[in-house]
Image (cartoon, rainbow, N blue to C red):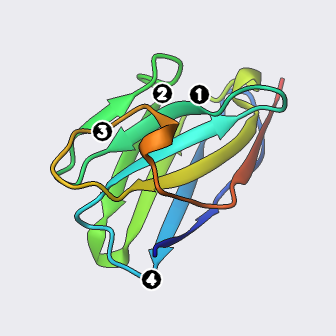
Amino acid sequence: QVQLVESGGGLVQAGESLRLSCVASGRATSTYNMGWFRQAPGKEREFVAGISWIGITLYADSVKGRSTISRDNAKNTVYLQMNSLKPGDTTVYYCAADLRRGVGVSTNTAVYDQWGQGTQVTVSS
């Protein structure tokens, strides 16, 4: 089992930046693909960004060019740096681990086995 804990959310103004962190415990995640998702009330959870175990990244069009996902395997931590935040980015962000091995980053929530509790991001206009 892998436990994931997100942090770094908060209230910012449009145009500002946030860096979300996801710390894993219980098992090293260096060989797993990791993803960030977000879910607004009444909507399905959607893919934001993912990083493979070898560092290949994938982004949703909605955040491409404004966000950077990275990982520090020594700290068992995955980051999501979000710049030029917009009010539309307001929602809860979740970190997830895909425990399969030898596959590329997936945008499908169904393949991610472990999830954090989420961190709220609020962007005011």
Which sits earlier in the primary sequence, circle 4 or circle 2?
4
> Measured from the top left, where is residue 30 in percent x and y?
26, 67
Q: Which mark is residue 48?
A: none
Q: Which residue is mark 2?
A: 66
64 vs 19: above or below: above
Label 2, label 3: how far apart the Cα atoms are: 19 Å
Q: Which residue is mark 3?
A: 105
Farthest residue to the bottom: give it: 26
At 30% from the left and 39% from the top, the residue drawn is 105
Crowding at mark 2 (Cα within 10 Å: few <14, some 14-19, many 20+): some
| Residue 101 relative to residue 21: left or right | left
Label 1, label 2: how far apart the Cα atoms are: 6 Å
At 51% from the left and 44% from the top, the residue drawn is 36
Q: Which residue is mark 4?
A: 26
At 64% from the left and 29% from the top, the residue drawn is 85
Q: Quadrant of residue 108?
A: top left
Q: Which residue is mark 1?
A: 84
Is label 1 in a helix, a strand or a loop? loop
57 vs 65: above or below: below
Which sits earlier in the primary sequence, circle 1 or circle 4?
4
Label 1, label 4: how far apart the Cα atoms are: 34 Å
